[in-house]
Image (cartoon, coloured by chain):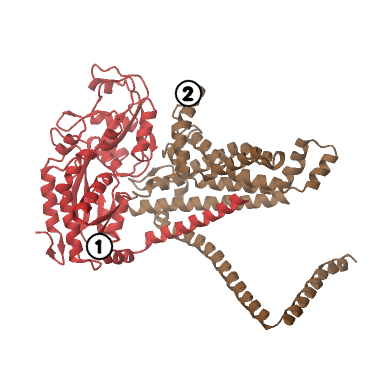
Amino acid sequence: MKIVNKLALSAIAIVVSGGLMLTSCNGSGSGTASKSDTTDNTILGAGATFPNPLYSKMFSEYNKSNGLKVNYQSIGSGGGIQQLTAKTVDFGASDAPLNGKQDSALSAPAVHIPATAGAVVISYNLPDLKDTLNFTPEVVAAIFLGEIKKWNDPKIAEINKGVKLPSTDIQVSHRSDGSGTTNIFTTYLCKVSKDWETKVGKGSAVNWPVGLGGKGNEGVAGGVKQTPGGIGYVELAYACQNNMAYGKLKNKAGNFILPSISSVTAAANIEIPADGKVSLTNTDAPDGYPISGLSWILVYKEQKYNDRSLDKVTKMLKLVQWMIHDGQQYSGALNYAPLSAKAVAVGDAILKSVTYDGKPVLQ
Amino acid sequence: METTVDNNLITRPENILGRVITSAKIRDAVKGIKRIKRSHRQIKAENVFRKTIILVALATVVLVLGIMLTLILQSVLSVKASGIGYLWGKTWDPVRDIFGAYPFILGTILTSFLALFISIPFSFAVAIFLGEYYPKGWLPNLLKNTVELIAAVPSVIYGFWGLAVLVPIVRSFETKIGVAPVGLGIFTSSLILAIMIIPYAASLGQSMIKMVPANLKEAAYSLGATRWEVIRSVILPYTKSGLFAGILLSLGRALGETMAVTMVIGNTTLIPKSIFAPGNTMASVIANEFTEADHPVYLSALIELGLVLFLVTVVINLIGKRLTKQFTN
């Protein structure tokens, strides 16, 4: 009977916490915002999980030199945007630019500052294979649509001449949780394949025609590693840290590019629009890896809201400025691609356009 | 005649109670004012305690109703968009805002009931062993603690264990019986769930079996019944409702289990064709997609999924209560 009592207790606890969670989702953020104002030396941020290791490193380094505390919650891009919309955080972070619906939900315009870049690699498990496989956009789309079912399919053999491909079945793994990684990957597939665009589309979670879902990068990696003939997409940083095999991909210019920090930075070395909102997927850069993407910091263009002090706003903007300049030195060690010079220039211009009570904050 | 006898039986205890109360009053009066003051305080404390208890109990009810209300309110958007077809729609496509929960409802029910069927023999065996054969001693104690430990292990650990150990075993089993050797899927999830829910039925059943009156069992033995016959015709019928309640508790746990299932079920929106196919459950879809649900209808569809899960649990509980009543009568 003891266990039953314990169960009842834990059930109540779950009910209580569940109730709190649901109501807090609903509530306006005024309470939290006013609370954060009392501690002016703390900046609150929330959003993307993908750049979290890099951001954590940057914030801890910045804290050492400037004493500013940054509390960043990596709850996912969607969650970060929601928190920014509710004005419960000072900045949001997202792997995808705001879409139309999210933009219109904001009470004031927000700006996108590119902060880092990453890539999605195509990882596979063919134990007897020594060479690095080549992929073309058409082949990748066909595999993830379930049209190419075996590794020795002529379409794969054609671009991998001289490689002895096994007749193993292809076992596709994809992310089961909504994620920026899926968003970048499906955005790329939409650009290169009409079939993909009409049948599946792009988003942080899509209706996969084939394959098994794994939770997080580790879930997909597990699916690929455990299944001979497995294929999946994971973040470059994750694949590097876990020594996974990944293939070269043909870019728009026709070159087969191995994903690496330098080829991702190269992908971002294109003309970036003044608002910073650009998808690097299927980049024009001849030596750029095509499934690359920027990750953005989101802040309101007009910073005077919720009784925020000018001091705090200045501190936050200086932090972001530091992130896109000096902060970039921490990218390489953590397998993130440093921003290209063009991206930094655009980011600088955007930061200078942010105002407090109508006046620009940074000079 | 009979009714008067009954009346006497009922009224007599009341009289006794009345006498006790009056004698107690007299004793109090004799003992003086100090004692009366204390009892006033005691009565006050009693009242406060009673009110607190009622308040807390009511708060629980209010909370559950509040959760249901929140779920209903937040899923209005999705109900408007998808209508009743949400329940049997076979496509879940967040990109095109087509939301059909059928694959997940099916997955939830399949995994839970399959897990229940797998776990029942084990939990009953443990219950009978601990309740009837060896109620005392170091081995039963060890077994009892181990079984209770199963309930204490966090579900993510089951998930990891499932992914690392169980999935390869299931995969080689699937190769032998000639189905697609995926390893992940409904069957693997059910196995994990079955292990996770054993303690609930086992521990309740065990204490129920211990409560069977010894004279009933002794009577059966004296009539020449064997141990198996005593278990079959005395203990099991006597503890039916308790065992059933344990099963129900297990089922409740299986329906809502999220983390371990998410890790081994394969997470596909396709409708499972067999128990070895990958699938998905309502709880794991919510866990997977909630953080990145980036437009209102999508979020609302996920909350509606929570509402459906809530209702499925309520309905299964109600049916269970009904059946328990029938069994006991």
State the image coordinates of residue A128 (x, y, percent, origin top left). 33, 19
**Residue positioned 46% across, 31% down in the render:** B165
**Chain identifier matching the red colour in the rendered picture:** A
Image colour assigned to chain B: brown
Q: Nearer the viewer, residue B317 or A296?
A: A296
Residue B26: image quadrant is bottom right
Identified by mark 1, the residue type is Ser
Question: In the rendered image of this protein, does residue A332 appear above or below residue A315?
Answer: above
**Residue positioned 48% across, 28% down in the render:** B169
Q: Secondary structure at mark 2?
A: helix
Residue on which disc 2 sits: B175
**Labels 1 and 2 within one chain:** no
State the image coordinates of residue A57 (x, y, percent, origin top left). 24, 46
| Dot 2 alpha-carbon crowd within 10 angstroms: few under 14, some 14 to 19, many 20 or more | some
Identified by mark 2, the residue type is Thr
State the image coordinates of residue A290 (x, y, percent, origin top left). 20, 35
Q: Nearer the viewer, residue A315 or A177?
A: A315
Q: Nearer the viewer, residue B249 or A198?
A: B249
Residue on which disc 1 sits: A107
In the drawing, does residue B312 fall left or right of residue B236? Answer: left
